[in-house]
Amino acid sequence: MCLCPDTSGTGTQAVMDGGTSAESRVPRPGRQPGASGEGAWAPRMVSSPWSLSRGRARVAAAVLCYINLLNYMNWFIVAGMLLDIQNFFQISDSNAGLLQTVFVCCLLLSAPVFGYLGDRHSRKAALSIGILLWSGTGLSSSFISPQYSWLFFLSRGVVGIGSASFSTIAPTVLGDLFVRDQRTLVLAIFYIFIPVGSGLGYVLGSAVLQLTGNWRWAFRVMPCLEAVALILLIVLVPDPPRGAAEKQEEAAVGDPRSSWCEDVSWSFVWSTLGVTAITFVTGALGFWAPKFLFEARVVHGLQPPCLQDPCNSQDSLIFGILTVVTGIIGVVLGAEAARRYKKVNPRAEPLICACSLLAAALCLFLALILARVTLLASYVFLVLGELLLSCNWAVVADILLSVVVPRCRGTAEALQITVGHVLGDAGSPYLTGLISGTLRAARPDSYLQSFLSLQYSFLGCAFVIALGGGCFLLTALRLETDQARARQPGTGTSDSKDAESQALLSSTGSVAENL
């Protein structure tokens, strides 16, 4: 057998003489290669090292991007029809915020479970289960009658559980298919679909509502798209070994490894807090911004109040389109800036995140303050704020993958999702609605006071996003040290599934050197 490095950057390729599996000799624990005596070497029949062509890796990445699009459409499809859902189930502002809170809380509670399973069992199976769960529950929720509003809340929670599987595991699969600049580019494309999916969630909900006059049909269209996604996942997406794309030599299976807690770095901690600030603001903004813009138009005399179904969904459509456009541009700008700036400054990624968040805080503050004075200026600063927030999605994912060893990435992704959502968008929509409802209760009942109450409740988001910028500045201080530590061989917790493949990589690497 002739072993050669894979120049495509997708792992180790094996060129088999005769096309059959080869016999490799793997040293037994406690014995040195070349030691005399029986049993110094244990012959083992193994298959060739895992490899995947560049074309198949790109196809797999495209499928995961499509599923990510659907995933985030599910996150915000309710916000695109919020006024109609509130009227149908008779839900107040403070309780309406609970729809997103229940969704996110169930997501974060199940994310560690999927992260654990993703690090130790078939990631492809976990992804398939998640898609089946969220699509089936979403379809069922379209048949709930008005007197069972609690059941609609529960269904959003189950959709969150299904979504947790994909949000936790999919980035780790991409991390094992691509490395370095390729990984940065692929993650940039993958995370473009967060704002794009979020925006299309508003657009789909609003468009279906306008076409049918019934918000329920939006939940009946999505399962058709998700069925296609499930088939594509099963047929075209592989389940690569952990760290398959990392060209690093590891010690044999018996070597000592550090514990998972020892592998957690300060860069990971500070970047997770920065991500938490982003999710806090995007959760509140994504859920309440269409209604805020609607009420701003009412205050300016451009829109009559919504007194019966169906409500005018123009603002949801506008906000959805803006989210899609700023998301695409922002993610591309952030990833490209990181790729170029890294050549002159290895701390480029957290510095870009910090600068974009601090600028976004100022834009969001001006958008809120100017909304009552001039709607056009408010839209301009809102667009700039969304653009700057979107610059971070691909960059923060690349930070995590660069400071966490391959075997711990699924669990680290789950931990970041859990912390980000517990302290972020799990409570921000409810907290924003609660503050708005409390302020509104103490004011005269008018659309102007309703608008002002929601405006004041949003101001805390500007402060939170500025704190997130500070967290990324702290990330920059530790980034290089933690990246070097993550690249060291023999780190990370071991698991039974990859023991054979890691022993194979070590032994075949030695054979290749001898050849």
Image (cartoon, rainbow, N blue to C red):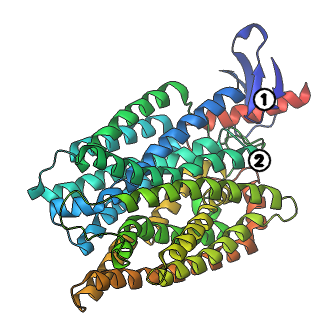
Compared to residue 496, the image places residue 199 above or below, namely below
Compared to residue 408, the image places residue 281 above or below, namely below
Q: Could you tell me how far apart the alpha carbons at marks 1 and 2 are, in whole angstroms?
A: 26 Å
Residue 315 image position (x, y, % from top left): 39, 62
Three-letter amino acid code of the residue under disc 2: Asp
Q: Secondary structure at mark 1?
A: helix
Residue 467 relative to residue 117: left or right = right
Q: Which mark is residue 181?
A: 2
Residue 178 image position (x, y, % from top left): 70, 41
Q: In the rendered structure, which disc, 1 or 2, sits on the residue that comes first in sequence? A: 2
Residue 53 figure quarter: top right
Q: Residue at x 22, y 64 (%)?
A: 86
**Res. 494 visible in picture:** no
Q: Which mark is residue 13?
A: none
In the foreground, 234 or 454:
454
Residue 265 relative to residue 32: left or right = left
In the foreground, 150 or 401:
150
Residue 164 image position (x, y, % from top left): 42, 51
Three-letter amino acid code of the residue under disc 1: Thr
Compared to residue 212, the image places residue 272 above or below, namely below
In the foreground, 147 or 22:
147
Which residue position holds label 1? Answer: 508
Q: Residue at x 21, y 55 (%)?
A: 152
**Res. 199 visible in picture:** yes
Residue 391 figure quarter: bottom right
Camera-near label (1 vs 2) is 2
Q: What crowding class fits label 1: few (fewer than 14 Cα within 10 Å), some (14-19), or many (20 or more)?
A: many
Figure quadrant of the N terminus: top right
Q: What crowding class fits label 2: few (fewer than 14 Cα within 10 Å), some (14-19), or many (20 or more)?
A: few
CB-based contact (under 8 Å), mark 1 and mark 2: no
Figure quadrant of the C terminus: top right
Q: Secondary structure at mark 2?
A: helix
